[in-house]
Amino acid sequence: MIVFRCLYFQITIALLLITQTTSTKADSCITSERSALLHFKAGLSDPANVLSSWEGHDCCRWKGVGCSNRTGHVVKLDLQGPPGFVKTMLGGNISSSLLGLQHLRYLDLSRNWFSGLQVPDFLSSLHSLRYLSLLGSDFAGRIPSQLGNLTNLRYLSLGYNHGAYFTDIAWLPRLSSLEHLDMSDINLGNLTNLFPDLNSLVSLKVLLISGCGLQNSPDYHVHSNLSSLEILDISSNEFRKPIKPNWFWDLTSLKQLDISYNQFSGMFPDEIGNMTSMRSLDLSQNNLVGMIPSNLKNLCSLEQLKASGNNISGSISEIFQLLPSCSWNRLSWLSLSNSSLTGSIPTKLGPLRNLVVLDLSENHLIGHLPLWIGGLTKLKDLNLQQNNLDGVIHEGHLSGLASLETMWLYDNSIAIAPNSTWVPPSSLTDIVIRSCFLGPEFPLWLRWPMHLYRLDISNTSISDIVPDSFWITASSVDSLMMGHNQLSGYLPSTMEFMTSFKMDLSSNNFSGPIPKLPVNLTDLDLSGNKFSSLPFDFGAPRLATLHLPDNSISGTIPSSLCKLESLMILDLSRNKLTGSIPDCLVNQSTTKTTSLSITHLSLTNNKLSGDFPSFLQSCKQLIFLDLAYNQFSGTLPSWIGEKLSSLVFLRLRSNMFYGHIPVELTMLTNLQFLDLSYNNISGHIPKSIVNYTGMIRMRDPGSALTFVLAYMHYDPAHYGENFTVVTKGQERLYTGEIVYMVNLDLSCNSITGDIPEEIGTLVALKSLNLSWNDFSSKIPDKIGSLVQVESLDLSHNELSGRIPTSLSALTSLSHLNLSYNNLTGGIPSGNQLQALDDQEFIYVGNPGLCGPMISKKCLGTELIPATLEHHEDVNDTVSFLIAMGSGCVMGLWVVFCTFLFKRKWRICWFSFCDSLYDRVYVQVAVGWVSRTRHNTVGRS
């Protein structure tokens, strides 16, 4: 008994000691593990000081650290970065000190920035790991096969590490307890045994292999072991095969299947009806055709159906009839955009009370919007854009949409006219209703305070003054699009406090000064209004595009333009600007050289003056420069070739520049459009013109000018620059196709000397105009090498000699003008030359020319130079001419003898000749007066 009591006492003491020890361990972490964590932190970069709490003795209280309540060991390390916040991401190196955490079961380093770092091999020694996520942390290099040693893993996420790759995946079957596997966006296309290895993971419930470059998908597995699989995502691969047979149709336990963006082909498969556990089915962006199968009605658990971007080509009413009525109360997402659907949306429908997303955009739907849409109280996204819907949307369609966040109805013929009492839901952030009907008055409901992210009411037939209350609503809008209306009024003086990033108010009637711009603004289009002046201080340090053409802006360009160091595209054309352009070479406030990012600069059609703008020396990325129709003067600087080496388009037309063409200008090897016409340029054309490789090579779709104009024309409805190019004898309007225009125009100057032979090397030229200069000597023979030229104008010079026969080989030529020179000899014959219009005007003013095209015979040495084919059958030609001459003589004698003996015939013939003479005389006289007037106008 005493022994028993003694034993009992010892056991009690031991239990108390164990309890005390356990309690102590639960209150603070183990010293060695705390040290391991601090060493791990020391190797990391932490720009946002995310790990600021990692101090003190109790590491179990540190952010992201979890300890066992029983043992005190660190068992969890959750350091995932928040999505989208780059500044809060961790980076640097992952220290092997983590091996000191041998009890670690949960490790999450996802959504960080371990740029280029290889997944550490030593992670495979953390044998207690159940959860490992390295998702989207920019790991690179080989993913170690040693991860196969983590046999206790249930969750493994390696996806979205673009630079990472597998050399083999034979280790994967060793993870027999794995339930979740994410390898998205890692190239698996070179792994020949991928699907058999995946098939061995009998416990797998989630498999994510989206965007892995897969091209081979087995039709089926004879013995599929993936009977527990619930979620399968194989989207964005390159299978390019029929939709059936495929191995995933045997996985009837699936609850979520995503096979979008794979170019699967064929009819919608009937196997869909066997997936009775399905909750989310995504078939989007494939090449499926026909109506969805009728056995879709079997999917009573269906919550999401996405089939956009296929060719259903059926009635929308039929689609709704095939939806499983047993799941109508569950359905939350219905997306059938861009599916060639026709007909009207049914006016009556069952209870879709849980619908959150309805996307029927980019189809051929007609008719009115049904009232049942107004009863979708949980609807967040309504997208019916780009259909042919019409009718009126009133408060009955809108009052029940209490959860609505985005409303995209643009490019329909819908009139949106709720009554004055309708208040937009407070959740509404996106309103895109471009090309609907809102006007003519400014909508009352847009005056209500809203927290909008995007507002697009472009081209909505509003013709009204913008009320001051609206600018309060618009102050928080990130993207404000109101172009192509008849809106009027002034921009608010508080505009600088708006939060907008993008703003388009083009093609309206806004007037007054342009105020200081919002600080976050990157893109602004105010073209086609009546603004009168620029702001003294632009503000907007991030501004990248500024479109202000076709206004009434007067005064000078303010020096604050030099502060816009992010500005890429600046268009101030067709205004009333005067004075010189400010010199931005030296920033006045800091005395340092300012580097500007401008790639596109258009100042055409103003009254700007001064020398060639010197600030352009700091625009080293300049591709497009248009200073035409101004009053700039002086000589062209030699630094153009060195400082503006990227220049592709240069137009200085109709200014007062003088002096020679600097040789350095020919250093612009990318130049494909050069227009120096209507200036006072003198001297010769440099022979180094052959350096213009931009006028030699065919147009590259990836060229710099293509890129800039693609950026300019990103949305043609909002911005479309107009270029007038003088070619083919008239002004022609170009927009995006200017990238294919290869032009050299030096007309209306005082350039002398020969036309250099080297000009024939510019074989990509489509238009060459050297008219109204003082060129002498002959037209170079190599001009026939310009095989792409469509318009060639050499008129009003002092050119002499013969017209090169090589001109007849220019099959693309549609306009030619050689008038008013001193050309002599026969005009070359050729199908292309004879097909040109206005033949007499092409050669007028060259009295020494002859040929059938101007009805002037060539005699003696003026005969057209013979070609090889002219000599091939010379004997036959001579014989033919002798026979024809004899026949003519005999015929004339027959007529003469007849007239000699028939008096009545003689009277009729001479009467006919008299009337014909009178008619011809009148025509010639009128034509001569008309031609004289034309020539007088042409010289002026």
Image (spheres, grey):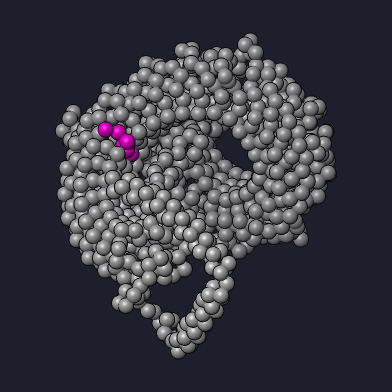
683 is higher (above) or lower (below) than 131: below
Can you say whether 881 is above or below 254 in the image? Answer: below
Residue 695 visible from this viewpoint: no
Residue 844: say if magenta: no
Which one is nearer the viewer's eye here, 497 or 269? 497
Q: In the image, what residue occupies the spot 65% across and 39% down? A: 362
| Viewer-side residue, 741 vs 905 | 905
Q: Image point 49% across, 38% down: which residue?
A: 715
Drawn side of residue 78 relative to residue 596, left or right: right
Rendering coords of residue 772 (x, y %): 27, 52
Q: Is residue 681 left or right of residue 464?
A: left
What is the magenta range?
A: 602-607
Looking at the rendering, in which quadrant would you find the N terminus?
A: top right
Vertical position of residue 443 compared to residue 105: above or below = above
Where's residue 141, x and y in %? Answer: 45, 55
Q: Residue at x 40, y 65 (%)?
A: 855
For the point 44% across and 70% down, which residue is it?
A: 830
Q: In the figure, residue 701 lies in which quadrant?
A: bottom left
